[in-house]
Image (cartoon, grey):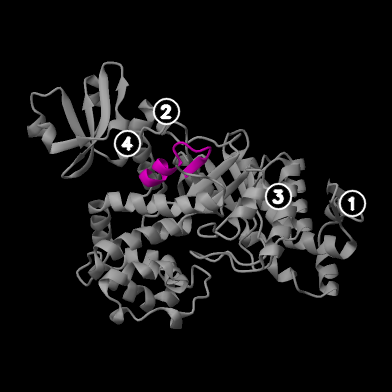
Amino acid sequence: MSSELFSIYPNSIQKHNNSQVKMVKTDEGDALYVSGSLSELFDGEIMTEATQGSDYKLFKCTLANSKIIMDLFDFTRPKSHKGQNITIGLGDRLGLASVGHIRLIRDLDIFPVLAQQSMRELNLTDRTYKDVLASAVWAVFREGYTKGYGADGDHLKTHDEVRYALSCGFSMITLDCSEYIRNDITNVKISTVEKLYKELSADVRQDLEERYLNKSFTIDCDTVIKYDKDDLERIVLIYFPAIRHILNIWNDLIQNTDIDFEISIDETQTATTPESHFFVANELIRQGVEIRSLAPRFVGEFQKGIDYKGNIKEFEQDFLIHTKIANLFGYKISVHSGSDKFSVFPIINKLTSNRYHLKTAGTNWLEAVRVIAMKNPELYREIHRFALNNLDKALAYYHITPDLSKIKELNNTPDSELPLFLDEDNARQVLHITYGLILQEKSADGSFLFRDRIYKTLEAFEAEYIKALEKHIGLHLSFLGYSFK
């Protein structure tokens, strides 16, 4: 086959015994080029006629072939980030963003979690964990990225969900405890708290009271946590069911593995108090749970796709205490919904001593939409109208508070100004949370209304998408203290 019919990704070239494996770009998309005896391992040869008589074969970048690549080249397999100080989740809902992410962080002291998806995201994008991991594998192999990356089963809630992510080879589990946190207890009367607390077994109450009641815990020279009767009883009622759930997951599925175990107690309506954070962490760690990172619910709001909403000084004070608690117990503080929170990034950089986990996801989808607005304005206009018309459905999954009156009228906006919608907070939020509805919508004949055209546009303008990701995620890193040449 003539080399004019494909171009080689030079960073992908790998040797294995007498064989060479590399990725190439063809008119049919990315393919795997294999020479020598190793070609017998791969599945689904393509372009057979063109390769007859040649010493190589071309294969599609399929799910099955990604598993073979992981078996042959260990650097393509997700790893634990234990010992890594700065870890960043780079959720990729379309499976097209990891090349841009790798090119951005390749030379930085950042451990990327390239495969990061929740069950909600899987359902809304009609993907599986195997699909998500395969997309990361191909990007890692194509870029020859050998420094290691992670795969996070994000915001999982049940044994079955955790077991599923682990069976697919994921290296990190973020356990969402929201369904076991009694938010209804937060504002009930003290008399009600006392009544419910007494319903706990006497042994449990005695054990907890001996450990916490009227006790003080020194976090550092400036921070001491104390528990009086009312505070302790309320905190126990709110968080004790979650602690039991975490212990069950840990004992059944996580212990005796090298899985990065993150605890999420952030999916609540009220901020996590320092006393609550300490109580949860102390109870888990004393019972043998190895926490790699923990996500409290900070003060203010971390809404999707826009900057932090709240008082910056209050956030800094709150974040400092939570970081101190994390440092005391030896795990990283984790910041969820971290996309576009530029005003708090310098605080995170300053107060954590460069030791934290940050999750981003939807902002990568928004950069994809930006490229569509630039290169396929007709498609963008359809997506924009659909998003506005279906916002109420998406609000069942995500909490945002956009002011729709501030979104410029689409019909009065020329094509050249369509990308500016991606710079306006209210439009960003609408486009952010409707991604699943956009990707799932079908025409009367059963074909996807947007999905195929979205992928076709982004594949045609891959260079522009990579550039957009490097610029936008690069801006995140700049506010986190990184400098770029």
Type of amino acid under label 2: Asp
* Image coords of residue 455 (percent x, y): 27, 56
CA gap, disc 1 and disc 2: 48 Å
Q: Which residue is mark 4?
A: 142
Earlier in the chain: of badge 3 and badge 1, it is 1
Is residue 161 in view from this perspective? Answer: no
Residue 468 percent location from the top left of the image: 36, 54
- Where does label 1 land, which residue? 216
- Three-letter amino acid code at the position of disc 4: Arg
The residue singled out by tag 3 in the image is 323
Q: Nearer the viewer, residue 378 or 69?
A: 378
Q: Mark 3 to mark 4: distance in Å? A: 37 Å
Image quadrant assignment for residue 2? top left
The residue that appears at 54% across and 66% down in the rendered structure is 303
Q: In the picture provided, is 178 more to the left or to the right than 441?
A: right
Q: Residues within 10 Å of mark 3 (few under 14, many from 20)?
A: many
Ranked by sequence position, the earlier of labels 2 and 3 is: 2
Structural distance between the alpha carbons of marks 4 and 2: 14 Å
Q: Give the alpha-carbon distance from disc 1 to disc 4, as whole Å.
A: 54 Å
Mark 4 or 2: the one toward you: 4
